[in-house]
Image (cartoon, coloured by chain):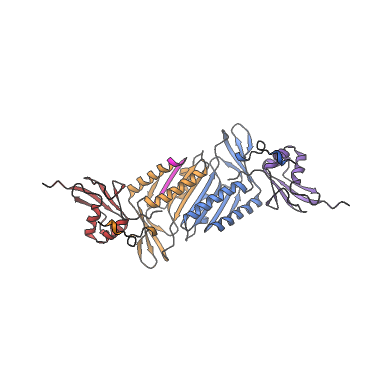
Chain colours: A blue, B orange, C red, D purple
Amino acid sequence: MNDITPDPIDVLAVVDSVKAHAAGGIDIFIGTTRDHSKGKKVVSLEYEAYVPMAMKSMTELENKARQRWNLHEINIVHRIGKVAVGEPSVVIAVSSAHRDDAFQACRFLIDQLKLVVPIWKREYFADGSVEWSMQTHEQPVTHESPQAHP
Amino acid sequence: MNDITPDPIDVLAVVDSVKAHAAGGIDIFIGTTRDHSKGKKVVSLEYEAYVPMAMKSMTELENKARQRWNLHEINIVHRIGKVAVGEPSVVIAVSSAHRDDAFQACRFLIDQLKLVVPIWKREYFADGSVEWSMQTHEQPVTHESPQAHP
Amino acid sequence: MESKRITIRLKLFSSAKDLAGFDERLVDIPPDSKSEAVLIYLAKHNPLFERWRTSLRIAVNMEYVDSQHLLHDGDEVAVIPPVSGG
Amino acid sequence: MESKRITIRLKLFSSAKDLAGFDERLVDIPPDSKSEAVLIYLAKHNPLFERWRTSLRIAVNMEYVDSQHLLHDGDEVAVIPPVSGG
């Protein structure tokens, strides 16, 4: 299934979409937007995506998960556009006959999504500043490597 | 929070109960009743609990999880009585600032719940038979140890 | 001179309840009885309790105990077959 | 005799879009250009692209590629700053 949507994510619909009568367990991860970042109060967030590549990338992650674990259904839904603090930005639901598979696959999917799926978060702070979120291990300016500049 | 209830579990209410504005991630496990067991078709299930001990036991598991991981909220809800195939029998939701904590704690809670919380499942099969579910590694009659009989 | 007997509240669940044919009963036992005494008591009702013995856990006042746990007057003693929640 | 130039569709996102001041543009480049050519092109618009270079990934036709990937006429070439979905 999988989706990238500007609408609020219907968590129950995502859960229902992976229910199967054969299912033993469903693991769901919900990422909610935080009210603080870098010590500053966040008032709202905005997500931008390279939508067709992000959809393709999520399908590739789904296929990898299905190769590694024995799964019934997978649904990855990411929101784009403005998201209020506390609302889900991403919901991933995985159903499987054995819970171990669902837990491991769900964890794999959110970890990989955060590494490779082309989606970006912009944080609007209470002090009026606006910043594209960068992972702390990927600060481009400070971790610049001189060798990479031929 | 935690609850043992004869009513259908409101998954969304359980998720909402662990939402916190500080939260970064929520992991949810949903156990759904299976339509087959021991090669036979299951038509419905019934859960029985030693309710006060089960509630105490769930609180102890919650406390253990809070000692081991950095968590915001935990909610464990188990259903008792008749449960139709495909309906949730248990929902566990855990919120934390870092998703690793939520995933590990949620996994710990369902694993431990299945080992120690005094709740029993009775399966009603399509062929008319009714059986208390036993874990395969705990078949009492075949794994009987003679030394235990003084 | 025999000492006074103590009374415990015996609670049975799931398959143990089915085997015994009752779910709760006040039982008088000798003082200094250990938790395993309830299984000996139950085996008199149904010999299958003897065969199932190693898979039954005992909880006293809602805490799991081992077979040598000393029982006291007024204890709630539950026989816990293998659990299957989740 | 110079070979014909090829045209790629350059797409920018997030901070890369802000740095460049545009989000999509058709760009003519020499044939046999490699993916890193788009970063050299962008550095002419804003020297910060040179400093950020090591943290920018390139996707050609929606697949991540390395800096030496050969570009072809009609390729969609996206500059992917560090992602922060989830």
- The residue furthest right is D1
What residue span does the magenta drawing correspond to? B66-78
| Membership of A136 in magenta stretch | no
Q: Which quadrant holds residue A142?
A: top right
Q: Nearer the viewer, residue D83 or B20?
A: D83
Residue A26: image location, x then y, percent: 48, 54
The residue at the point 69 percent across, 39 percent down is D52
A32, A144: nearer the viewer: A144
Q: Is B77 inside the magenta-drawn segment?
A: yes
Quadrant in which the C terminus of chain D appears: top right
Q: Quadrant of residue D20?
A: top right
Callout count: 0
- Determine if residue B105 is in view: yes
Outermost residue toward the left in this view: C1
Q: Nearer the viewer, residue A110 or A67?
A: A67
Q: Is residue B148 above or below residue C61?
A: below
- Direction from residue D3 to residue C7 in the image, left or right: left
Q: Nearer the viewer, residue A112 or B72?
A: A112
Q: Residue furthest top?
A: A127
Residue B135 seen in this snapshot: no
Seen at 58% across and 49% down, the residue is: A112
Measured from the top left, where is residue A138 in percent x and y? 63, 40
Q: At 25% across and 50% down in the image, what residue appears? A: C35
- In the rendered view, does A88 fall on the left or right side of D66? left
Residue B89 location, x and y as percent? 42, 54
**How far across and down, in percent of the image, does residue B100 sit?**
51, 44
Q: What residue is drawn where x is 44% and y is 48%?
A: B108
Q: Is residue A6 left or right of residue B105?
A: right
Residue that sits furthest to the bottom in the current view: B127
